């Protein structure tokens, strides 16, 4: 049943690549408001393409945004699209973004970042993997069903934005606003906006959250001479170092009492997932440039990155940091650290415990200086249920197309989008990447390989098919 569909994709691959070239040529850099007109243009092209395939499109107004200059400018709209609905079928909502990170040839690109260039099977250009290639692959998957006169076996909706790289302005509010309308009949939300962990196709079922902390110690009314005042005053820097030193030990264990209590226990089923991941500790050592990790095995390192919390100290503002020597006692210093949290940690609870802990350590020093702790939550952690039909269909589709067992992976970094959709809509969310681990998203010479782009399109076609099969059985 999938064969004629795959044939169509193979026969049209040059056309699909050409379309990616058209999209890459549009400099839809959301970081520069002067380029937002290009984002509008690309969103309109996307809408036009969906209409050509028979879908209906609403360009949802998400209001205005205030620039750092104080000027208020209208935000690009968000594309909400739907194809004719059959109440007998499951409904899949596809999320993607058409804006990109900035890129300049002088930054170290070997080719013009806005001219799609194919070299040895790789398609180079800004946005090829993040996220224009995957968005087009979804559109081409729908096209493939239509062009081969096969009924699309699920109802398809799309939500495509142009502000992802700067924080998805307006998306969360729109999701809330559309919860009882656009999202009401959606069963599954799929996001293809990350990459595989290795060379093996993967499904992503979790991301870590994050909180960022500022710890300020404010002391004398000005910087002081260490020869004059050293030994007679409570130095803000010494206070701060002891505060920062109380957070984590040499094994990577977070020492803030109670913070890790809520971490979900490791079950046998999950433990096995790490064994199957094609991942070389040696290679990672080389990439990071370290002699060894805090853990000894591949499984332990992956778990430390994906399913356990971590605490990193990032900087000290106000410290003397220039070359040379200066016998100064800085009057005020601010330490900066963050915690990556994981299910079932609650960010507000973490924040409270960190504050209590720092206040207690500070109190024990009997310092007359003033302590201030400020916390900001970046995003909550996200984890999906692997038994969800969407994940079963995703795994089958990977076997159909690539003939291998998929890797079930998480992201150690924080991607708020999946958690936001899951929390706001209550729907099942899956991340189904098609990019490779070395695509270099956000970096110079970003690429997607022709193989990943074209086989990825097949994967989406197969996924739609497998999803409809499962729904029939349930
Ligand atoms: Mn992206
Ligand atoms: Mn990105």
Image (cartoon, helix red, strand yellow):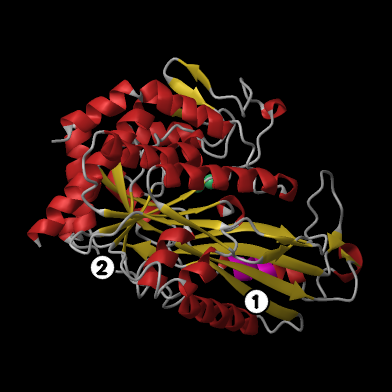
Tag 2 secondary structure: loop
Q: What is the spatial separation of the Cα atoms under label 2 and label 1, in whole angstroms?
A: 30 Å
Q: Residues within 10 Å of mark 2 (few under 14, many from 20)?
A: few
Q: 216 above or below 401?
A: below
Decide if residue 290 is in sight here: no
| Residue lying at 56% horizontally and 58% vertically, measured from the top left | 168
Quadrant in the rendering for residue 296: top left
Q: Tell me the residue that label 2 is attached to.
A: 265
| Residue lying at 37% horizontally and 60% vertically, measured from the top left | 308
Quadrant in the rendering for residue 427: bottom left
Q: Tell me the residue that label 1 is attached to.
A: 373
Quadrant in the rendering for residue 460: top left
Residue 254, position as x, y percentages in the image: 45, 66
In this rendering, the count of numbered labels is: 2
Q: Is residue 131 magenta?
A: no
Disc nearer the start of the sequence (2/1):
2
Q: Is residue 296 left or right of residue 126?
A: left
Residue 238, position as x, y percentages in the image: 71, 68
From the image, which quarter does the C terminus lie in?
A: bottom left
Of all residues, the one furthest to the top in this rendering is 120
Depth check: 267 or 320 in front?
267
Check if mark 2's residue and mark 1's residue have beta carbons within 8 Å: no
The residue carrying mark 2 has its beta carbon less than 8 Å from ligand 1? no
Of all residues, the one furthest to the left in this rendering is 473
Residue 294, position as x, y percentages in the image: 41, 49
User: Magenta span covers which residues?
Assistant: 240-244
Q: 395 above or below 257?
A: above
Residue 272, position as x, y percentages in the image: 18, 51
Name the chief secondary structure element in magenta: helix
């Amino acid at each position: 049943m999938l064969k004629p569909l795959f044939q169509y994709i193979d026969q049209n691959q040059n056309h699909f690549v050409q379309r990616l070239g058209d999209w890459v040529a549009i400099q839809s850099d959301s970081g520069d408001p002067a380029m937002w007109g290009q984002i509008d243009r690309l969103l309109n092209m996307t809408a036009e393409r969906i209409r050509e395939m028979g879908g209906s499109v609403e360009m949802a107004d998400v209001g205005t945004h205030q620039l750092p200059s104080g000027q208020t400018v209208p935000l690009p709209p968000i594309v909400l699209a739907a194809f004719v609905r059959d109440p007998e079928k499951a409904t899949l909502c596809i999320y993607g973004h058409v804006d990109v990170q900035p890129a300049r040839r002088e930054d170290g690109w070997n080719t013009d970042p806005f001219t799609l260039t194919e070299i040895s099977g790789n398609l180079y250009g800004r946005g090829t993997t993040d996220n224009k290639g995957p968005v087009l692959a979804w559109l081409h998957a729908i096209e493939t069903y239509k062009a081969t006169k096969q009924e699309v076996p699920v109802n398809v909706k799309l939500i495509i934005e142009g502000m992802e790289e700067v924080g998805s302005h307006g998306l969360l509010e729109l999701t809330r606003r559309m919860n009882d309308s656009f999202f009401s009949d959606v069963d599954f939300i799929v996001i293809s906006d990350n990459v595989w962990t290795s060379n093996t196709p993967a499904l992503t079922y979790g991301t870590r959250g994050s909180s960022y902390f500022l710890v300020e110690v404010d002391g004398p009314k000005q910087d002081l001479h260490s020869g004059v005042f050293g030994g007679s005053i409570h130095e803000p820097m010494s206070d701060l170092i002891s505060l920062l030193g109380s957070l984590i030990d040499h094994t990577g264990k977070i020492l803030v009492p109670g913070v890790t209590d809520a971490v979900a226990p490791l079950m046998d089923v999950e433990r096995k997932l790490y064994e199957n991941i094609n991942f070389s500790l040696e290679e990672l050592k080389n990439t990071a440039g370290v002699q060894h990790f805090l853990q000894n095995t591949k499984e332990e390192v992956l778990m430390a990155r994906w399913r356990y919390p971590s605490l990193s100290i990032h900087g000290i503002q106000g410290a003397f940091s220039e070359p040379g020597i200066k016998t100064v006692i800085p009057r005020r210093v601010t330490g900066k650290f963050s915690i990556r949290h994981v299910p079932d940690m609650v960010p507000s609870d973490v924040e409270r415990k960190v504050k209590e802990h720092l206040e207690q350590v500070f109190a024990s020093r009997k310092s007359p200086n003033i302590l201030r702790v400020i916390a900001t939550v970046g995003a909550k952690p996200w984890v999906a249920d692997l038994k969800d039909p969407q994940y079963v269909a995703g795994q089958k589709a990977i076997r159909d197309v690539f003939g291998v067992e998929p890797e079930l992976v998480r992201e150690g970094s924080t991607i708020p989008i999946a958690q936001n959709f899951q929390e706001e809509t209550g729907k099942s969310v899956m991340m189904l990447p098609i990019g490779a681990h070395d695509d270099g998203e956000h970096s110079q010479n970003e690429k997607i390989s022709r193989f990943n782009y074209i086989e990825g399109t097949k994967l989406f076609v197969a996924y739609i098919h497998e999803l409809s099969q499962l729904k029939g059985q349930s």
